[in-house]
Each structure stands twice: as structure tokens, then as C-alpha cells.
Image (tube, rainbow, N blue to C red):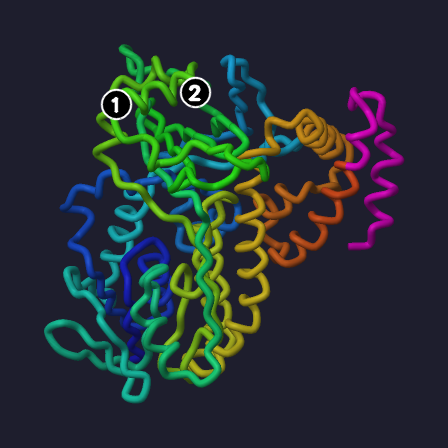
Amino acid sequence: MPKVAIIGAGLAGSLLAIYLAKRGITVDVYEARGDIRREAASAGRSINLALSDRGIAALRGVGMDDYMLAEAVPMYGRMIHGLSGETKLLPYSGREGEYINSVSRAGLNVAIIDAADKFGDVTFHFGRRCTDFDCETGEVVFAGGRVHSETVIGTDGAGSAVRRAVGSFVKGFDASQEWLDHGYKELHIPPGVKGEFQLEKNALHIWPRNQFMMIALPNFDGSFTCTLFIAHRGDRRSSGKPGVRVPAFDQLKDASSVLEFFNDEFQDAVPLMPTLTDDFFANPIGVLGTVKCYPWNVGGRALLLGDAAHALVPFYGQGMNCAFEDVRVLDNLIEEYGTDWKTVYENFGQLRKENTDAIADMAVENFYEMRDATADPVFQRKRELETKLEQTYPEYFSKYSMVTFREDLPYSAAKRKGNAQDELLMEICRSVDDVGAIDFDDVITQVEALGA
């Protein structure tokens, strides 16, 4: 019976274990952390996940989609919060039934591990940190010894030890890591006194402030997980103006500076955050980066998958969805080629590399869109126009909809088509003050003429 070692029991690794077990493959999953089902999640590291169609399709493949969606909160659009507390909802789609779902990272991970544990051919080994991988012998190196498996799949995240080993071994291995000068800090809005949501529950809330932003995603218990995205250091120049400092973590050193900043920038949120300063100083500052590399395999001995191969910043809500799509694509290749791992892995890389690069680039672009453009009246008109077009012409999909609701469309195609459409629609919306004055038929004709 074929045997596979998976390094990393996060979302992608645990889901992959189920897919492999369903094909009669024996799986050992090695995880550096303890069993998440028996340990509290690390404070400040539980950014909610936006589960959308690509991820749902992968869960559907193992019968977990309905179960997880029952524990999710639907989000129908971005709720934009202005400086004075005014709000405006920008729908994600103009079609009924298209929305994203706020889910708990830890809750989803626990559910998938539990499901994988039901297979007799899946064994989890917690507290086993992979320190190296021997690309010649196929042995995984741990602090307590070595383990050999027929093949190894590294799903051990952005800091992957398996990737480091592959990079050292493979001649011409190409790798890059690009870090945003912004970090993030997790904060919290609790439920109201009767357990109610204190903000609109079916929206992703954004406080866009040009050089920084805060977002909030709803939780099933009525709370919101908030995340502040801001520069690490305030010595950068804002908009090229000499001497202008932008707010940054290094300027928020005590409770008074934090409260002053939040009262100036997020005044409608502050009354809803009774533990604001406690959370701010208790939770760590996270970093935001993109990892790209290639090739992802060493013959048939090892493969990189998920964040180990292509870590994304979280601003398109596609990191998990992309990794889950990896799992689904790999499973399709196993169906086609069996356990000829060399052939499976080579085809996997050829199919996925272009697409993971595309979503990585779009995720960075969407950071600036969320932070800066969502407050721009022209951008808001563009989103209104896109919604109207999707309501009127079923064949029209905005870039966001192509990425989020078209599981059949590769990310690379969504990027190519979406960027061309965005440029056209922004140009149209700069010339009008009212979307109602636009000839929708003419816009669709121009979109079709793009030929992207």
C-alpha cells in the first residue's frame, strides 16, 4: 500500500490527508505544534478566514462543505466606515447566492483533523518538528531521529523546512520573499449584552484610512475579530511629502497614544472595544509577506503545497482557498496518474505555478485597494456599476467575482480579464457622477471587445 508523509497538520495538510486516505493511501501527518484540539490557540494569531467557492469545492469533495458552512457567518459585501462613522455597503456580487463566509481558522482546522482521524490509515504525530529533509534518501529529519516514507508532501507553511531543504538541493531553485512594510495586530469586538452582533453581521467591515486600515470579520458567537494593518515604522514619507509621518506601530507605545489614535481614526469602533488597550499590548505584531518559489518538487520524493510553495498576504481572502484548490488539483492528478509521484508532481507544478503567482500578485494589489481605494468615490461608483452589470447580465463577472465565485476559472485568467475590465470601468466611472447615467449595453459591448 502506498505511504505518504505530510509535514504540517494545518488546514491544507489535514485536508490532504483525507483526500489521500480516500484513495487508499496510508498517511502519516507530522506537526510541530501540540494537538490543537487540546491546546488553546495562540493569542492574536487567529485571523478569521474567508471561505469562498474554491475552498468550498475542496470541502465538498470530502463531504465537509455543509458542516462547515453551518458554522460560518455569510458576508455579502464590504461595509465601509468613514471617519465620521458613516457607512456604505459595497456588495461583493450582483448575483443572488454569491457571498463569502467568515469561519474560524482554529475551528475549521479542528474539524478537518477530526474528520481525518476517522480514517484508520491516517496517523497524526504531534510535537514532531521537521528540521530538515534529505532530498537524496527521502528521509524527514526530526529532533529525535529520521523517518523514511515513499514520498513527502510539505504543507509546513511559509517558513517551510521542506522548502528550505528543496531549495538547497535543487540546482536553479528560484525563491523570493517580499515583505510589506505593514504588520498586523489582532483586536476584538465582543457580543452585546444579549449576545447580539454590535455591527452589521453579514459584512466584512473596513475602516480604510489611505496609509492604514482596520477590518472586522464576524464570528458565530456574535463577536468580531478585528485586525489593524499599519506600518511597522513611522519614518516613511506619506504620499511623497517630506517630513510627513504616517501612523505606525512604533508610535503606539502606551495606552494614551493607542486611545488617541483610535479615537481619531476609528471613533465608531472604540465604544465597541472595551478591551482595546489590553488586546493591543497583549497580542503580537504579525508580519505580512509573499513567498514564491519553483520548482516545488524533487523527483517523486517530495512536493511543496499550500503556503510552503506560495504564501500569500491575506487581502484577497484566498490563502486557504488557494491551498484547498491545490489539494483538489493534486487529487485529480492522482486519479489520472495513480502514485507515479514524479509525474503527478511535475504536472502539479505546471498547472499551479502560473495561477498561484497570479493570486499572490492580486492579493498585494487588493491590500492597496482595501486600504486606499474603497473610500474613493470613483472606486465606489465602479463597484456599483459592477453590481448593476452582474444583476443585468448573468455572463458578466467582475474581477472579484471571477476570483471568488468562479471555481472553474484559473486565477491567471481572472487576473488577465479582471485587470482589463477594471481599467475600463474606472475610466468610465471617472467621467460620470451617477452610475444611472451609464449605458450598460454599451459597457458590456466594450467589455466584450477587450478580448481578454
Characterize the magenta stretch by its predominant secondary structure.
helix
Q: Residue at x 27, y 88 (%)?
A: 137
Image quadrant containing the C terminus: bottom right
Residue 255 is marked as: 1
Q: Residue at x 37, y 30 (%)?
A: 226
For residue 125, what is the image quadrant? Answer: bottom left
Residue 266 is marked as: 2
Q: Label 1 vs label 2: CA separation?
A: 15 Å
Instruction: Choose the circle earlier in sequence order: 1 or 2.
Output: 1
- Name the amino acid type tagged 1: Ala
Decide: is 287 above or below 160: above
Q: Secondary structure at mark 2?
A: loop
- Name the amino acid type tagged 2: Phe
Q: Residue at x 48, y 29 (%)?
A: 204
Image position, residue 221 (x, y; %): 30, 25
Q: Specify few, some or many for label 2: CA neighbours under 10 Å numbering under 14, 14-19, or 20 or more.
A: many
Tell me, yes or no, whether the highlighted magenta stretch contains residue 34. no
Q: Secondary structure at mark 1?
A: helix
Tell me, yes or no, whether the highlighted magenta stretch contains residue 447. yes
In the image, farthest residue toward the front: 243
Span shown in magenta: 427-452
In the image, farthest residue toward the top: 193
Image position, residue 390 (x, y; %): 72, 34
Q: With 262 as the anchor, is 125 left or right in this view?
A: left
Residue 83 is marked as: none
Image position, residue 353 (x, y; %): 54, 67
